[in-house]
Amino acid sequence: MNLWDIIVAIILGIVEGLTEFAPVSSTGHMIIVDDLWLQSNQLFGDEVANAFKVVIQLGSIMAVVVLFWGRFLDLLGLRKIKTASPASSKLNLLQIIVGLLPAAVLGLLFEDYIDEYLFSINTVIVGLFVGAFLMLAADKFRPRLVAETVDQITYKQAFLVGLFQCLALWPGFSRSGSTISGGVLLGMSYRAASDFTFIMAVPIMAGASLLKVVKYWDYFTMDTLPFFIAGFISAFIVALIVIGFFLRLINKVKLKPFAIYRIIIAIILLIIVW
Protein backbone atom coordinates (compact mmCIF):
# COMPACT_ATOMS: atom_id res chain seq x y z
CA MET A 1 0.00 0.00 0.00
CA ASN A 2 1.46 3.35 -1.05
CA LEU A 3 0.34 6.94 -1.49
CA TRP A 4 -0.84 6.35 -5.06
CA ASP A 5 -3.20 3.61 -3.88
CA ILE A 6 -4.82 6.06 -1.44
CA ILE A 7 -5.08 8.72 -4.17
CA VAL A 8 -6.78 6.18 -6.46
CA ALA A 9 -9.22 5.29 -3.68
CA ILE A 10 -10.02 8.96 -3.03
CA ILE A 11 -10.54 9.73 -6.73
CA LEU A 12 -12.84 6.76 -7.21
CA GLY A 13 -14.72 7.67 -4.03
CA ILE A 14 -15.19 11.20 -5.36
CA VAL A 15 -16.54 9.86 -8.67
CA GLU A 16 -18.95 7.60 -6.78
CA GLY A 17 -20.08 10.40 -4.47
CA LEU A 18 -20.63 12.79 -7.38
CA THR A 19 -22.62 10.40 -9.54
CA GLU A 20 -24.39 7.72 -7.49
CA PHE A 21 -27.48 9.76 -6.68
CA ALA A 22 -27.31 12.48 -9.33
CA PRO A 23 -29.25 11.49 -12.50
CA VAL A 24 -26.09 11.04 -14.57
CA SER A 25 -25.19 7.31 -14.19
CA SER A 26 -22.38 6.33 -11.85
CA THR A 27 -21.68 3.26 -14.05
CA GLY A 28 -20.88 5.42 -17.07
CA HIS A 29 -18.48 7.53 -15.07
CA MET A 30 -16.73 4.52 -13.57
CA ILE A 31 -16.05 3.29 -17.09
CA ILE A 32 -14.39 6.60 -17.93
CA VAL A 33 -11.99 6.18 -14.97
CA ASP A 34 -11.44 2.53 -15.80
CA ASP A 35 -7.67 2.98 -16.06
CA LEU A 36 -7.63 3.68 -12.34
CA TRP A 37 -9.68 0.53 -11.77
CA LEU A 38 -7.19 -1.46 -13.81
CA GLN A 39 -4.33 -0.20 -11.68
CA SER A 40 -6.16 -1.07 -8.49
CA ASN A 41 -6.98 -4.50 -9.96
CA GLN A 42 -3.30 -5.11 -10.68
CA LEU A 43 -2.45 -4.21 -7.11
CA PHE A 44 -5.16 -6.14 -5.32
CA GLY A 45 -6.98 -8.39 -7.79
CA ASP A 46 -10.49 -8.37 -9.25
CA GLU A 47 -12.22 -9.54 -6.08
CA VAL A 48 -10.73 -6.75 -3.97
CA ALA A 49 -11.70 -4.21 -6.63
CA ASN A 50 -15.26 -5.54 -6.52
CA ALA A 51 -15.28 -5.29 -2.74
CA PHE A 52 -14.04 -1.71 -3.01
CA LYS A 53 -16.97 -0.81 -5.29
CA VAL A 54 -19.32 -2.03 -2.57
CA VAL A 55 -17.51 0.00 0.10
CA ILE A 56 -17.69 3.31 -1.77
CA GLN A 57 -21.36 2.69 -2.62
CA LEU A 58 -22.01 2.23 1.10
CA GLY A 59 -20.34 5.60 1.64
CA SER A 60 -22.83 7.25 -0.72
CA ILE A 61 -25.74 5.44 0.91
CA MET A 62 -24.63 6.62 4.34
CA ALA A 63 -24.80 10.21 3.08
CA VAL A 64 -28.50 9.75 2.23
CA VAL A 65 -29.14 8.22 5.65
CA VAL A 66 -27.57 11.24 7.33
CA LEU A 67 -29.49 13.76 5.22
CA PHE A 68 -32.84 11.99 5.72
CA TRP A 69 -32.18 10.77 9.27
CA GLY A 70 -35.36 12.24 10.73
CA ARG A 71 -37.47 10.89 7.88
CA PHE A 72 -36.11 7.36 8.34
CA LEU A 73 -36.76 7.49 12.09
CA ASP A 74 -40.31 8.54 11.32
CA LEU A 75 -40.81 5.76 8.74
CA LEU A 76 -39.64 3.19 11.28
CA GLY A 77 -41.92 4.62 13.97
CA LEU A 78 -38.98 5.65 16.14
CA ARG A 79 -39.76 9.36 16.11
CA LYS A 80 -42.63 11.57 15.03
CA ILE A 81 -41.88 14.51 12.77
CA LYS A 82 -44.25 17.06 11.37
CA THR A 83 -45.29 16.59 7.76
CA ALA A 84 -44.68 19.45 5.39
CA SER A 85 -47.92 18.58 3.66
CA PRO A 86 -51.19 20.29 4.54
CA ALA A 87 -52.92 16.94 4.08
CA SER A 88 -53.31 14.51 6.95
CA SER A 89 -51.46 11.72 5.14
CA LYS A 90 -47.73 11.19 5.38
CA LEU A 91 -45.21 9.08 3.52
CA ASN A 92 -45.11 5.66 5.18
CA LEU A 93 -43.07 2.49 5.06
CA LEU A 94 -45.64 0.60 2.99
CA GLN A 95 -45.36 3.15 0.19
CA ILE A 96 -41.59 2.62 0.15
CA ILE A 97 -42.10 -1.15 -0.05
CA VAL A 98 -44.65 -0.74 -2.87
CA GLY A 99 -42.11 1.38 -4.78
CA LEU A 100 -39.32 -1.14 -4.23
CA LEU A 101 -41.17 -4.29 -5.28
CA PRO A 102 -41.03 -4.07 -9.11
CA ALA A 103 -37.27 -3.55 -9.39
CA ALA A 104 -36.53 -5.94 -6.52
CA VAL A 105 -38.48 -8.76 -8.19
CA LEU A 106 -37.04 -8.16 -11.66
CA GLY A 107 -33.55 -7.72 -10.23
CA LEU A 108 -33.70 -11.09 -8.47
CA LEU A 109 -35.11 -12.83 -11.54
CA PHE A 110 -32.61 -11.41 -14.04
CA GLU A 111 -29.54 -10.64 -11.89
CA ASP A 112 -27.32 -13.25 -13.55
CA TYR A 113 -28.43 -12.23 -17.05
CA ILE A 114 -27.81 -8.55 -16.33
CA ASP A 115 -24.35 -9.22 -14.87
CA GLU A 116 -23.36 -11.46 -17.78
CA TYR A 117 -24.78 -9.64 -20.78
CA LEU A 118 -25.57 -6.02 -19.96
CA PHE A 119 -22.48 -4.70 -18.19
CA SER A 120 -20.56 -3.43 -21.19
CA ILE A 121 -19.58 -0.02 -22.47
CA ASN A 122 -22.03 -0.35 -25.40
CA THR A 123 -25.05 -0.99 -23.19
CA VAL A 124 -24.04 1.87 -20.89
CA ILE A 125 -23.89 4.24 -23.88
CA VAL A 126 -27.40 3.19 -24.89
CA GLY A 127 -28.61 3.69 -21.33
CA LEU A 128 -27.06 7.16 -21.14
CA PHE A 129 -28.70 8.29 -24.39
CA VAL A 130 -32.14 6.79 -23.77
CA GLY A 131 -32.18 7.96 -20.15
CA ALA A 132 -31.31 11.49 -21.28
CA PHE A 133 -34.26 11.56 -23.68
CA LEU A 134 -36.56 10.30 -20.91
CA MET A 135 -35.42 13.19 -18.72
CA LEU A 136 -36.01 15.70 -21.52
CA ALA A 137 -39.47 14.20 -22.06
CA ALA A 138 -40.24 14.58 -18.35
CA ASP A 139 -39.36 18.29 -18.51
CA LYS A 140 -41.43 18.85 -21.64
CA PHE A 141 -44.52 16.74 -20.95
CA ARG A 142 -44.90 16.95 -17.17
CA PRO A 143 -48.61 17.09 -16.24
CA ARG A 144 -50.44 19.20 -13.68
CA LEU A 145 -48.77 19.08 -10.26
CA VAL A 146 -50.59 16.72 -7.87
CA ALA A 147 -47.84 15.97 -5.32
CA GLU A 148 -45.80 18.99 -4.30
CA THR A 149 -44.12 17.19 -1.39
CA VAL A 150 -43.15 13.59 -0.76
CA ASP A 151 -45.96 13.33 1.81
CA GLN A 152 -48.56 13.79 -0.92
CA ILE A 153 -47.41 10.80 -2.98
CA THR A 154 -50.10 8.12 -3.42
CA TYR A 155 -49.66 4.36 -3.39
CA LYS A 156 -50.37 4.29 -7.11
CA GLN A 157 -47.66 6.85 -7.80
CA ALA A 158 -45.24 4.94 -5.56
CA PHE A 159 -45.85 1.73 -7.51
CA LEU A 160 -45.57 3.42 -10.91
CA VAL A 161 -42.30 5.11 -9.88
CA GLY A 162 -41.18 1.62 -8.89
CA LEU A 163 -41.88 0.49 -12.45
CA PHE A 164 -39.77 3.35 -13.79
CA GLN A 165 -37.01 2.22 -11.43
CA CYS A 166 -36.90 -1.07 -13.34
CA LEU A 167 -35.33 0.87 -16.22
CA ALA A 168 -32.28 1.37 -14.01
CA LEU A 169 -31.56 -2.37 -14.21
CA TRP A 170 -30.13 -1.46 -17.61
CA PRO A 171 -26.61 -0.15 -16.84
CA GLY A 172 -26.18 3.53 -17.65
CA PHE A 173 -29.85 4.39 -17.28
CA SER A 174 -29.41 5.74 -13.73
CA ARG A 175 -31.68 4.87 -10.85
CA SER A 176 -32.31 8.48 -9.89
CA GLY A 177 -32.67 9.57 -13.50
CA SER A 178 -35.37 7.01 -14.23
CA THR A 179 -37.30 7.44 -10.98
CA ILE A 180 -37.19 11.24 -10.84
CA SER A 181 -38.28 11.41 -14.49
CA GLY A 182 -41.05 8.91 -13.78
CA GLY A 183 -42.19 10.84 -10.73
CA VAL A 184 -42.35 14.11 -12.64
CA LEU A 185 -44.34 12.47 -15.46
CA LEU A 186 -46.75 11.19 -12.78
CA GLY A 187 -47.41 14.69 -11.44
CA MET A 188 -44.85 14.99 -8.65
CA SER A 189 -42.74 18.07 -8.15
CA TYR A 190 -39.05 17.61 -8.93
CA ARG A 191 -38.22 17.84 -5.23
CA ALA A 192 -40.91 15.33 -4.21
CA ALA A 193 -39.74 12.87 -6.88
CA SER A 194 -36.12 13.36 -5.77
CA ASP A 195 -36.89 12.89 -2.08
CA PHE A 196 -38.85 9.72 -2.81
CA THR A 197 -36.06 8.44 -5.07
CA PHE A 198 -33.36 8.89 -2.44
CA ILE A 199 -35.42 7.49 0.42
CA MET A 200 -36.46 4.48 -1.67
CA ALA A 201 -32.87 3.83 -2.79
CA VAL A 202 -31.47 3.30 0.71
CA PRO A 203 -33.06 -0.06 1.66
CA ILE A 204 -32.55 -1.75 -1.70
CA MET A 205 -29.00 -0.46 -2.20
CA ALA A 206 -27.97 -1.02 1.42
CA GLY A 207 -29.40 -4.54 1.39
CA ALA A 208 -27.62 -5.46 -1.84
CA SER A 209 -24.37 -3.89 -0.67
CA LEU A 210 -24.39 -5.61 2.71
CA LEU A 211 -24.94 -8.98 1.03
CA LYS A 212 -21.89 -8.29 -1.10
CA VAL A 213 -19.89 -7.26 1.96
CA VAL A 214 -20.57 -10.73 3.37
CA LYS A 215 -19.56 -12.25 0.03
CA TYR A 216 -16.25 -10.37 -0.09
CA TRP A 217 -15.57 -10.36 3.66
CA ASP A 218 -12.32 -12.33 3.33
CA TYR A 219 -10.86 -9.47 1.27
CA PHE A 220 -11.24 -6.96 4.11
CA THR A 221 -7.70 -7.25 5.42
CA MET A 222 -5.16 -4.95 7.06
CA ASP A 223 -3.58 -4.45 3.63
CA THR A 224 -6.79 -3.36 1.92
CA LEU A 225 -8.51 -1.48 4.77
CA PRO A 226 -6.68 1.86 4.22
CA PHE A 227 -7.70 1.71 0.55
CA PHE A 228 -11.31 0.93 1.47
CA ILE A 229 -11.51 3.53 4.24
CA ALA A 230 -10.13 6.32 2.02
CA GLY A 231 -12.69 5.51 -0.67
CA PHE A 232 -15.58 5.25 1.80
CA ILE A 233 -14.81 8.60 3.43
CA SER A 234 -14.37 10.48 0.15
CA ALA A 235 -17.58 8.96 -1.29
CA PHE A 236 -19.52 9.85 1.87
CA ILE A 237 -18.33 13.46 2.08
CA VAL A 238 -18.80 14.20 -1.61
CA ALA A 239 -22.22 12.51 -1.76
CA LEU A 240 -23.32 14.48 1.32
CA ILE A 241 -22.43 17.75 -0.40
CA VAL A 242 -23.77 16.80 -3.84
CA ILE A 243 -27.13 15.44 -2.64
CA GLY A 244 -27.78 18.45 -0.42
CA PHE A 245 -26.90 20.82 -3.27
CA PHE A 246 -29.00 18.83 -5.75
CA LEU A 247 -32.11 18.85 -3.54
CA ARG A 248 -31.89 22.61 -3.05
CA LEU A 249 -31.68 23.28 -6.79
CA ILE A 250 -33.70 20.57 -8.56
CA ASN A 251 -37.03 22.46 -8.59
CA LYS A 252 -35.26 25.38 -10.28
CA VAL A 253 -32.90 23.70 -12.75
CA LYS A 254 -35.11 20.67 -13.56
CA LEU A 255 -33.64 17.74 -15.53
CA LYS A 256 -32.49 19.27 -18.81
CA PRO A 257 -28.94 20.19 -17.68
CA PHE A 258 -28.36 16.63 -16.45
CA ALA A 259 -29.76 15.18 -19.69
CA ILE A 260 -27.36 17.29 -21.76
CA TYR A 261 -24.49 16.25 -19.53
CA ARG A 262 -25.42 12.56 -19.99
CA ILE A 263 -25.37 12.99 -23.76
CA ILE A 264 -21.88 14.52 -23.52
CA ILE A 265 -20.68 11.59 -21.39
CA ALA A 266 -22.19 9.12 -23.87
CA ILE A 267 -20.32 10.86 -26.72
CA ILE A 268 -17.06 10.67 -24.74
CA LEU A 269 -17.62 6.94 -24.24
CA LEU A 270 -18.30 6.52 -27.95
CA ILE A 271 -14.96 8.20 -28.66
CA ILE A 272 -13.25 5.85 -26.18
CA VAL A 273 -14.84 2.82 -27.87
CA TRP A 274 -13.90 3.95 -31.37
Image: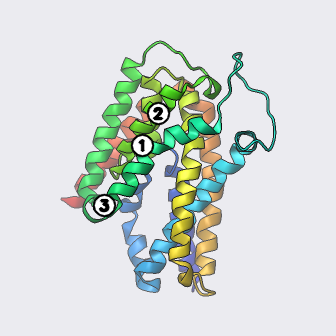
> Are circles 2 and 1 on residues that touch, CB within 8 Å?
yes
Q: CA distance from mark 1 to mark 3?
A: 21 Å
| Disc number for residue 119 | 3
Amino acid marked by disc 1: Pro
- How crowded pointer 2 is (Cα within 10 Å; few <14, some 14-19, many 20+) is rated as some
Q: From the top left corner, tell me how far across and down residue 117 is, in percent.
A: 24, 61
Q: Which residue is pictured at 71% across the width and 19% down the height?
A: 88
Tag 2's secondary structure? helix
| Residue at the spot of label 2 | 159
Q: CA distance from mark 2 to mark 1?
A: 8 Å
Q: Closer to the N terminus: mark 1 or mark 3?
A: 1
Tag 1's secondary structure? helix
| Residue at the spot of label 1 | 102
- How crowded pointer 3 is (Cα within 10 Å; few <14, some 14-19, many 20+) is rated as some
- Which of the two residues, 151 or 121, is positioned nearer the viewer here? 151
Q: Is residue 224 visible?
A: yes
Q: Is residue 27 above or below residue 160?
A: below
- Which of the two residues, 5 or 141, is positioned nearer the viewer here? 141
User: As drawn, which residue projects farthest toward the left?
Assistant: 274
Q: CA distance from mark 2 to mark 3?
A: 26 Å
Amino acid marked by disc 3: Phe
Q: Which residue is pictured at 69% across the width and 20% down the height?
A: 85
Q: Is residue 14 visible?
A: no
Q: From the top left corner, tell me how far across and down residue 269 is, in percent.
A: 28, 54
Nearer the observer, disc 2 or disc 3?
2
Q: Closer to the N terminus: mark 2 or mark 1?
A: 1
Q: From the top left corner, tell me how far across and down residue 150 is, in percent.
A: 61, 28
